[in-house]
Amino acid sequence: MAAAFGGSRGVAAKAPEKGVFPLDHFGECKTFAADYLACLKREKGDSLECKRLSKRYLECRMDANLMAREDLSKLGFRQGDSESAPGKATSKSASGEQARQRAKRGFVPGVRGQ
């Protein structure tokens, strides 16, 4: 009965593995976040088309010390991702089309033979 009123509950909560994700109180990366969200809206939620913007947002957060510096390959980016010009649409890019086709087939990362 004591647990119902704030008594001992057993296992204590664990902190997130990578730590906290501080808010951008000074708006240092606000424009990058807004660009990314606008891209998601324009592309009807297709994040592959907005990958360049998400990379720029994460780089901004790292530069502003809002997150720990991390190798972008560990965050899902490959060498050459987002090398297209900022204003150009990439909806017909070969890699984006391949990714969409894999998603339609039920691609599961890390499982061979798909």
Image: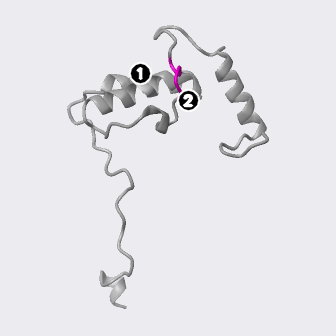
Q: Amino acid at mark 2?
A: Ser
Pick whichever, 92 or 77, lies toward us. Answer: 77
User: How far is disc 2 from disc 1 in space, using C-alphas?
Assistant: 12 Å
User: Which residue has dot 1 on it?
Assistant: 35
Most frequent secondary structure within the magenta stretch:
loop
| Quadrant location of the C terminus in the rendered image | top right
Residue 81 lies in magenta, yes or no? Answer: yes
Q: Can you say whether 51 is above or below 85 in the image? A: below
Q: Label 2 crowding class (10 Å Cα cut-off): few <14, some 14-19, many 20+?
A: some
Q: Residue at x 39, y 77 (%)?
A: 11
Q: Is residue 33 visible?
A: no
Residue 29: x percent and y percent? 30, 27
Relative placement, left or right, of 76 versus 22 is right
Q: Residue furthest bottom?
A: 1
The magenta-colored residue range is 78-82
Q: Amino acid at mark 1?
A: Asp
CB contact under 8 Å: marks 2 and 1: no
Relative placement, left or right, of 106 versus 88 is right
Q: Residue at x 64, y 15 (%)?
A: 93
Q: Which mark is residue 53?
A: none
Q: Label 1 crowding class (10 Å Cα cut-off): few <14, some 14-19, many 20+?
A: some
Residue 10: x percent and y percent? 38, 81
